[in-house]
Image (cartoon, rainbow, N blue to C red):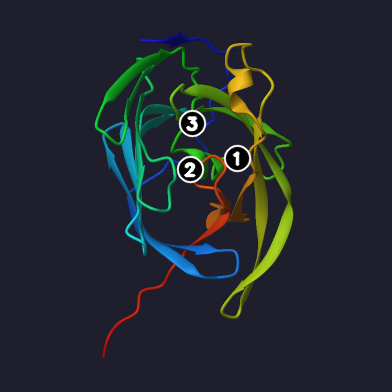
Amino acid sequence: MCVLSVLAGAEPVKVRYAQGSSHGFLALKTLDGRLIATGESTQTVHGGRVTSRLTFHFLDGSTDDDVTIFTQSNTFRLISDHHIQRGPSFPKPIDFLIDGESGQIISRDKEGKLTQEHLDLPGDVSNGLPPNLLLNILPSTTETKISYVVPGSKPRVVRLSIKPKGSLPFTVGSLRRKATDFTIHVELGGLTGVVAPIIGKEPADYHIWLQNGTPPAFVREEGPLYEGGPIWRMEEISPTFSH
């Protein structure tokens, strides 16, 4: 077992809009519009805990499955996050479980070997949470910082900087709306000397567009699904019916 320590994170995001039960469908596309995966998003509430699951089924047989459990009493707190990526679309498959309460990190490699490590996780660790968190961040907030555990042979905690980068007009049928572009940037500073050299080159930014309003609404996401991966676009998809 390996023990790594990180600097304390920022304050957890405060709850403005409590998350409820939901079920929706998503499309994952390349930036030129080619469909590569179809996704399903579910969220259920039991007592004080919310279980969120996002699963993508790729045309090449790959799977991206992320199950997140969190609480939302005054602030959002991660209980656990179990993220699996496997198949041709993922050159480095992962099976990665974070216990947000104990700090235990359990990973399984492609041969099935389990590795367990411990991280001193800050209270704002946010794996699986960014879309829910952004729904609760005002567009007028200059910057919000949260912590995130990066999977790998040596898991490490990085700091994410979330900033609104202006608005983008869009239409839904005859309706005209505006969406705020929230940019998520991985900061390489603020880490201990042991962790920082592992990061290497700076990862690409991630973008989430939310419709302005009360409450705000998800519009689109763009970014890599894994470290060093291509930029893909995530949008809601409408069902089609055979006649």
Q: Earlier in the sequence, mark 3 or mark 2?
A: 3
| Mark 3–mark 1 CB contact (< 8 Å) | no
Residue at 54%, 45% (x, y): give it. 135
Is residue 221 something that shows in the picture?
Answer: no
Quadrant in which the C terminus appears: bottom left
Residue at 24%, 32% (x, y): give it. 112
Instruction: Give the percent coordinates (x, y) of residue 179.
Output: 65, 58
Residue at 50%, 45% (x, y): give it. 131
Which type of secondary structure does the marked residue at label 3 adopt?
A: loop
Q: Nearer the viewer, mark 3 or mark 2?
A: 3
Q: Which residue, given by chain and number where applicable, does mark 2 sit on? A: 132
Which type of secondary structure does the marked residue at label 2 adopt?
A: helix
Using the image, tell me which numbered label, if any, was put on residue 137: 1
Badge 2 amino acid:
Asn
> From mark 3 to mark 1, how far is it between C-alphas?
14 Å
- Callout 2 environment at 10 Å: few (<14), some (14 to 19), or many (20+)? some
Q: Which residue, given by chain and number where applicable, does mark 3 sit on? A: 126
Q: Earlier in the sequence, mark 3 or mark 1?
A: 3
Residue 58, quarter of the rendered image: bottom left
Q: Earlier in the sequence, mark 1 or mark 2?
A: 2
- Callout 1 environment at 10 Å: few (<14), some (14 to 19), or many (20+)? many
